[in-house]
Image: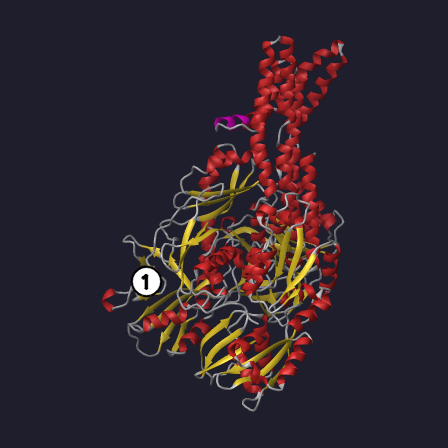
């Protein structure tokens, strides 16, 4: 009934190294002990913890070498479970391989810089393993970050080898990934060896115009806004024996990064993620054995650091808002054209139209351009405009542009690559004139005009070819230059002109196709807020600050048309919120006090909202969405890799063939040599692989963007391609086919041992530490009946039993809460007596039944909860089955509850498998997957297995399936393990994404054939 997790009692921290090689932390210099490194004065008798090793680079099997290795010690490790751990770890971001360590209970995890050690430990915890870091390879002397660069010179995959040849030899670079469609280059590097700016300079020096889009070093700095320092004062005196007890008590809490204990002063300092664990929770955890008080709350400490933002340098630009009652998507282009024709970037640097709220946000310099002039301009193009907010009057000055860690979107700079340059147009004109030489007579001299066409169209291509040859490479640009000069040598000037002009036009068309895909992806990236209205915690003053610098726990004000900077809770106001960017749901949702809101959603109502942030911008819902989309673009499908490998082998073969055609026939006769040389040059032109290499990634990019705009995140072309071959879909029940919103329908005491209030107290006490939806329901039911957390009962040794329930020691007696399987194993089920028939009846009626048992007393309580089926589930299941896809259901619930839901959604009872543990689900899904030797090679054949789930206990099965689909409201681990995420949990979108995958595969096959 609950997720598979066991409390971790061991610390999981990172440390830095000082010159002597020992762990040290500047802030903890006055503390005798730091949990992160567990090093104390040896004279005090405390043992030293695990040593910290230097960073270790190893060769990987990927196309670019460079990986990190993290060693994890697992207390209850079984070597036979390594395959399960590997199957769950590999789908995590950045994980490459998991292997056994050289010591007992030790595993090695090879990964890149995008992987997080905390996520590895949380995953192991979810699987029931007690683990901690044995050695950490992240330290100040050798730190690897991931930076993102925008490279203008990328037009197709033929440039990728050149970029890799430039970047890979640079010192400190460990890995490089290139996204041709978005022109993005992702580089993992040591910022102390080489910075992101230096990488961009190296590319620029080789002819690839580049700029840093996201500096990995800055991103790491930004993430610190979510970590606060809480200080606790211990009321009684401490001794050295108290140190490990305090570390153990606090170190096992999720979100705690570092613990320091000052025995002399009686002070405990904890660095922790305030969104995951609060100062009050830390105090309550320690209060069990040590009376203590909060001297400084971590959230307050973050706010104190944030006050510096109120004194940051301001720019000359302010933010104003215009209200346009007749704003539509159709006239946005007209507005953009009017702005570009009448203003320059020094007057108006950015604008953000938002149709649902009928507003436009403007970033303008009021000394050069006031908002009234902008409003008057829009009135001339028949728009109904009024000034909602005058930034100059309200002193809404924007920070300096340099303060932003990411680029400003909606800027005034044009996209030069979409314009057909004058030299290309002139080349076309001269080429057309040269064709007139075929008329004959006096017109024959017009063939020399073809040289002018070559002179206009060929230089940019020649420059690229020259740079490529300098790197000892040969690409499409070299092929075209060879063909053009060859035609000139044969005095076929009109042919040379056609090569120069048509290739220049083809580059323009390719750039336009890529730009359309980039624009679709850009609409996703633009969801990230650029800035936020931060409210001063003391004076209440509102200032505009870069969104990346908004700390957790701060207060932000969201006016009409504003994007919410980060996830948070409404503390003041009520207004309609547009969440379509995240969920695809067009209908605005009214949010009021105490309601949760997501970063990236927009206030489309008439009232402002004051929101207290619960996470940083980088951890918000919209940032997670953007990261998923960006990672999806870098996840290349097997077809893309096949096309690139084909082009790599195909180009030299064509060049060799053309070379033989242009040389050997001259040995026979000049006439034959002339003719065959012309044929060889024609072969070089028509065999250029550019169209093939650009069509595949553009198709994938367009499909990925289309699904993302509908609230469906597909993690790369390989997942999209696999959707076209789905044969079986396996659904979890709770939270997937049902809403996961339980209601306590029945609660009865068995015998005369305890009252209903006693039952609710036990439920509240044991279920409150769990994150399972069923546990939340039971806690909520207790609160609704006025039963809070019982202070008179003491609980220890709380443990979650995988697939069965919970056990804990309460007042010295073992108390169990769980399902029938648990109590059958304990031998208590027979003590249920007359309630046995009633429990079976509830189960057959579709309810989830649970029991409360105490050692020595047997079962003392029985309860049932109900869960509603999703409204769209039945239609979605029917559509899938009509499409020839087999549908199955797996659940850990009872047979009666499982069959009841299956009947409502249209799944045959022989396709229902119930009472399964997480590992049972894993083995069942694995048994359906065909081995590689029997896999279908035709993309249109169906042989794939899809798993759809939402909880932590579904994560292993999601990882092992050919395609894993997670519900967006489910556990974060499930979304990490999955290949596809349905952000709004609408099952009808599953049908859409499968159809999209099939259409994408067909389109790519057509492109390859053509």
Question: Where on the picture, by quarter, is residue 881?
Answer: bottom right
Between 22 and 939, the one lying in front of the other is: 939
Task: State which region is magenta.
Answer: 465-470
Tell me where residue 186 appears, x and y as whole percent: 51, 44
Between 648 and 913, the one lying in front of the other is: 913
Tell me where residue 728 appears, x and y as whole percent: 66, 56
Residue 952 in view (yes/no): no
Tally the marks: 1
Question: Where on the picture, by quarter, is residue 231?
Answer: bottom left
- Residue, disc 1: 49
**Could you tell whether 351 is left or right of 121 in the image?**
right
Residue extending farthest left: 43
Question: Where on the picture, by quarter, is residue 811?
Answer: bottom left
Rendered view: 892 above or below 750? above
Residue 817 in view (yes/no): yes
Rendered view: 681 above or below 283? above
Tell me where residue 960 appears, x and y as whole percent: 56, 56
Graded by Cα atoms within 10 Å as few (under 14), some (14 to 19) or many (20 or more), the crowding at tag 1 reads: few
Rendered view: 441 above or below 633? above
Q: Main secondary structure of the magenta part?
A: helix
SS category of the residue bearing label 1: loop
Q: Magenta stretch: residue 76 in it?
A: no
Snapshot colouring: secondary structure
Split into 4 quadrants, where in the image is the C terminus? top right
Tell me where residue 400 appears, x and y as whole percent: 51, 50
């Amino acid at each position: 009934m609950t997720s598979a997790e066991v409390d971790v009692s061991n610390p999981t921290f990172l440390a830095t190294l000082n010159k002597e090689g020992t762990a040290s932390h500047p802030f903890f210099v006055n503390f005798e002990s730091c949990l992160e490194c567990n090093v104390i004065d040896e004279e005090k008798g405390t043992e030293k913890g695990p040593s910290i090793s230097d960073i270790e680079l190893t060769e990987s099997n990927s196309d670019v070498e460079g990986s990190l290795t993290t060693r994890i010690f697992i207390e209850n490790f079984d070597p036979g479970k390594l395959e399960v751990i590997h199957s769950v770890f590999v789908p995590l971001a950045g994980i490459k391989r998991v292997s056994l360590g050289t010591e007992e209970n030790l595993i090695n995890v090879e990964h890149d810089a995008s992987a997080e050690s905390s996520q590895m430990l949380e995953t192991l915890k979810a699987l029931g393993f007690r683990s901690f870091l044995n050695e950490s390879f992240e330290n100040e002397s050798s730190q690897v970050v991931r930076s993102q660069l925008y490279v203008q010179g990328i037009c197709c995959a033929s440039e990728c080898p050149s970029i890799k040849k430039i970047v890979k030899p640079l010192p400190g670079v460990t890995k490089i990934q290139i996204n041709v469609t978005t022109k993005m280059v992702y580089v993992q590097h040591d910022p102390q060896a080489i910075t992101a700016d230096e990488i961009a300079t190296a590319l620029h020096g080789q002819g690839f115009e580049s700029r840093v889009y996201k500096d990995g070093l800055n991103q790491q700095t930004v993430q610190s806004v979510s970590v606060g320092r809480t200080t606790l004062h211990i009321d009684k005196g401490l001794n050295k024996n108290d140190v490990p007890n305090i570390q153990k008590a606090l170190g096992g809490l999720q979100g705690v990064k570092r613990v320091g204990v000052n025995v002399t002063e009686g002070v405990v300092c904890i660095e922790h993620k305030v969104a995951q664990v609060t100062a009050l929770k830390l105090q309550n955890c320690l209060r069990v054995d040590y009376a203590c008080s909060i001297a400084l709350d971590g959230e307050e400490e973050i706010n104190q650091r944030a006050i510096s933002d109120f004194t940051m340098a301001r720019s000359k630009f302010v933010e104003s808002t215009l209200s346009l009652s007749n704003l539509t998507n159709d006239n946005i282009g007209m507005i953009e054209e009017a702005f570009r024709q009448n203003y320059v970037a020094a007057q108006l640097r950015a604008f953000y139209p938002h149709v649902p709220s009928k507003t436009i946000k403007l970033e303008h310099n009021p000394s050069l351009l006031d908002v009234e002039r902008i409003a008057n301009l829009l009135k001339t193009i028949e728009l109904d405009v009024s000034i909602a907010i005058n930034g100059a009057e309200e002193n809404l000055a924007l920070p300096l542009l340099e303060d932003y860690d990411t680029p400003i979107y909606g800027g005034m700079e044009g996209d030069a690559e979409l314009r057909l340059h004058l030299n290309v147009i002139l080349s076309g004109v001269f080429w057309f004139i040269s064709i007139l030489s075929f008329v004959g007579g006096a017109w024959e001299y017009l063939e020399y005009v073809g040289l002018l066409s070559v002179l206009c169209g060929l230089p940019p291509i020649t420059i690229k070819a020259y740079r490529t040859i300098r790197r000892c490479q040969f690409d499409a640009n070299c092929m075209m230059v060879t063909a053009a000069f060859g035609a000139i040598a044969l005095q076929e000037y009109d042919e040379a002109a056609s090569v120069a002009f048509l290739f220049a036009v083809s580059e323009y068309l390719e750039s336009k196709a890529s730009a359309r895909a980039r624009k679709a992806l850009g609409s996703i990236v633009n969801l990230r807020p650029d800035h936020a209205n931060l409210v001063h915690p003391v004076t209440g003053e509102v200032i505009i600050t870069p969104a990346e610098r908004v700390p957790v726990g701060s207060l932000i004000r969201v006016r009409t048309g504003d994007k919410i900077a980060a996830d948070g809770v409404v503390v003041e106001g009520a207004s309609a919120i547009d969440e379509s960017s995240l969920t695809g749901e067009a209908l605005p949702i009214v949010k009021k006090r105490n309601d949760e809101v997501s970063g990236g959603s927009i206030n489309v109502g008439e009232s402002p909202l004051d929101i207290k942030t619960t996470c940083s911008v980088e951890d918000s819902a919209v940032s997670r969405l953007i990261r998923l989309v960006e990672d999806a673009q870098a996840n290349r499908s097997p077809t893309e890799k096949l096309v690139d490998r084909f082009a790599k082998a195909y180009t030299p073969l064509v060049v060799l063939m053309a070379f033989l055609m242009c040389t050997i026939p001259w040995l026979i006769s000049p006439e034959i040599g002339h003719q065959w040389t012309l044929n060889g040059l024609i072969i070089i032109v028509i065999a250029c692989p550019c169209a093939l290499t650009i069509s595949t990634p553009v198709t994938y990019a367009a499909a990925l963007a289309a699904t993302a705009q509908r609230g469906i995140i597909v993690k790369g072309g390989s997942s999209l391609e696999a959707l076209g071959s789905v044969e079986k879909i396996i659904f979890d029940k709770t939270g997937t086919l049902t809403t996961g919103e339980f209601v306590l329908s029945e609660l009865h005491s068995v015998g005369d041992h305890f009252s209903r209030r006693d039952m609710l107290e036990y439920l509240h006490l044991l279920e409150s530490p769990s994150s399972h939806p069923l546990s939340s329901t039971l806690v909520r039911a207790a609160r609704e009946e006025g039963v809070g957390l019982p202070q008179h009962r003491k609980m220890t040794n709380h443990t979650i039993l995988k697939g069965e329930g919970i056990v804990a020691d309460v007042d010295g007696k073992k108390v169990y809460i769980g399902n029938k399987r648990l109590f059958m194993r304990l031998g208590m089920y027979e003590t249920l007596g007359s309630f046995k028939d009633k429990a079976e009846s509830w189960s057959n009626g579709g309810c989830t039944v649970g029991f409360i048992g105490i050692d020595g007393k047997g079962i003392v309580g029985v309860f049932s909860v109900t869960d509603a089926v999703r409204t769209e589930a039945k239609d979605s299941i029917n559509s899938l089955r009509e499409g020839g896809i087999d549908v199955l259901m797996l659940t850990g619930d009872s047979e009666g509850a499982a069959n009841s839901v299956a009947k409502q959604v249209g799944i045959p009872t022989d396709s229902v498998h119930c009472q399964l543990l997480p590992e049972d689900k894993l083995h069942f899904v694995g048994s359906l997957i065909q081995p590689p030797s029997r896999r279908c090679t035709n993309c249109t054949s169906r042989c794939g297995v899809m798993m759809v789930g939402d909880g932590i206990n579904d994560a292993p099965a999601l990882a092992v399936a050919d395609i894993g689909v997670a519900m967006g409201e489910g556990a974060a681990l499930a979304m990490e393990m999955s290949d596809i995420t349905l952000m709004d949990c609408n099952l009808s979108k599953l049908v859409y994404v499968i159809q999209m995958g099939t259409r994408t595969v067909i389109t790519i096959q057509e492109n390859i054939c053509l």
